[in-house]
Amino acid sequence: MVGIWSLLIGLLGLGFLLDYVSIPVLTGFISATAFVIGMGQVDSLVGLDDVPDGAFNQLANILRRLPYWDGPTCGIGFGTVLVLLTLQKVGQKWGNKHFVIRYMSSSRAIIVMVIFTLISYLVNKDREEYIWSISEVSTHGIQTPKAPDSVLLSKVIARSIAPLVACTLEHQAVGKAFARRNHYAIDQTQEFNYLGVTNIVNSFFGSMPVGGAISRTAVNSECHVRSPLNGAITAGFIILTLYVFSPALYWLPSSTLAAIIIMAVIHLFGPLSLIWRYWRISLADFIACMVAFWITIFVSAEIGIGAAAGWSVAWTLLRSAFVTPTVSASKTSNSPSAPLGRVATTTVSPSPPQTGMTENAGGPAIPDDTVVVRFRDSLFFPNANRNKVHTLEAIQLVYPSVQSPTYSADAERLWSVAAERRLERLRAQRGVVVRQMPLAVVVWDFGMVPFIDATGITALAELKDDIRRQLGLRVQIRVVAMTKGVRRRFRRASWKLVDADGLMDSGADVVYPSLERAIWDERDRDSLKGVTTEKS
């Protein structure tokens, strides 16, 4: 099933789905998996039977039965661990100076298998009862290929998700890391196709799911392998081992095999310094890591990684829901309190008193009758209403309300004045002085909006309507920095937009090529008179 899933992902070009599994989630998942696998081998390492399921149950049971640990088995097991650690440390210290030492260090698992299998054979060959448990591997080469049982496939469809995520993420990570080191690029789709074909073929021989190996890739990189022919040579040696040397594996001590597995997975456990780093950088990432770790240990691997990935997606949506726009306007000499700057969604810079204008955060100056609204994220269903409410409130705090004849029905709406009272309360709390200059232009800056959905467009339509209803029918909405994709969605929504250099349409909003031009374009600026007339 891992092969089928991988091949489907590759053929459909869905490799981007792995981007939803963040690095902290992967750290927690792999650490928990390493812990579960390691604890599952400790009973063989110390010679105990009847150990319960569950990593922490196993740990408690093994420690409680410490006096019953088998001495010879512990000697072989911990001896294997000692040799593995010694070869690893020797390789780290002198491996860069001597190729033989580096090769011995990278092949340390094979070395200990040979050493302790030979010891086991010499000690146990003439005994009816072996001193320690041995693997008793019995193999006669490669099994005859056969199709997997359909009943088995139906049982592992869901459970295959966890090994799929584990092997594909590790495979892609290893590929990208060594691609950077050796100055080449990998094709993510091609890697998925490779994993799919490989695991589908392997399933006919009863093998486990496989992916790219960190250790072998590192050896190939250090040995300057440049051709796929290396894989053929490696496969030849493996086949030779299966047919010629496999009978010797009958005498392999179970504790040695357990020690090799434990030492292989212990390096996968995320260091505490890395988890502490997640805590310091982002609480959300730390929570995602912990969700993946603990649920994988106490429930299952597939639910653990699914819950952690779900948390990451939920947090992303929640964070997007609270992104609000930045509303910028001038600070006039008769408004010393700079009211917009005291709204949480607004920034204002001081202006020269003789001009009544301001530098817009290093950009063009803004006249007194203009507001610039910078949307800081995609406008979609989690944050659309919040963007609309914050923008309208920030503008209404400063600019006077203008009664429009088009919305004369509002004069009869006396049953709810909560919004008006809230504005009065905020003005009093923040010392806001309402400007005498009515609003004439609102510029929507879409420079940070890569995406918009139907909810976002509806919210902007309501915002446009509210601005003209509350602040003047002739207030112009000008647009700048709109991407082609966003503009295409506006067009599909039948929202009329025209370019500033194109033919004008009285019912359309104008799209400008630059923020400065959108702010200072004098086209229809005499509409300010209409606003003043409405107010009077």
Image (spheres, grey):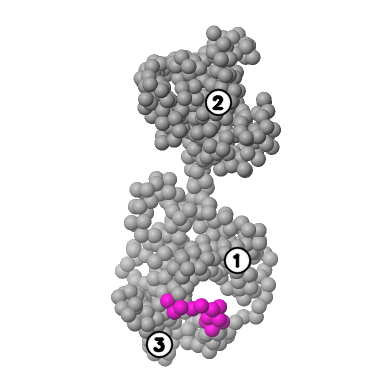
Q: Position of residue 156 (x, y in %)?
A: 61, 62
The picture quadrant where one finds residue 127 is: bottom left
Residue identifier under label 2: 522
Q: Residue at x 51, y 57 (%)?
A: 301
Q: Where is residue 72 in the image (x, y as percent from the top left)?
A: 34, 79
Q: Where is residue 101 in the image (x, y as percent from the top left)?
A: 35, 82
Residue identifier under label 1: 190
Q: Which amino acid does label 2 sit on?
A: Glu
Q: Which amino acid does label 1 sit on?
A: Gln
In screen coordinates, is 408 left or right of 277?
right
Q: Classify mark 1: residues with Cα within 10 Å, few (<14), some (14-19) or many (20+).
A: some
The foreground one among 529 and 431 is 529
Position of residue 334 relative to residue 137, above or below, is above
Report how far apart the C-alphas of labels 2 and 3 lie in the structure: 92 Å
Q: Which residue is drawn at 54% across and 84% down?
A: 233
Which numbered disc, 3 or 1, marks the residue closer to the eye? 1
First along the sequence among labels 2 and 3:
3
Q: Give the range drawn in magenta.
A: 222-234
Residue identifier under label 3: 118
Report how far apart the C-alphas of labels 3 and 1 lie in the structure: 43 Å
Numbered disc total = 3
Q: Which residue is drawn at 34% across and 63% down?
A: 63
Q: Residue at x 34, y 52 (%)?
A: 276
Q: Classify mark 2: residues with Cα within 10 Å, few (<14), some (14-19) or many (20+).
A: few
Residue 226: in magenta span: yes
Q: Which quadrant: the N terminus? A: bottom right
Q: What element carries label 3?
A: helix
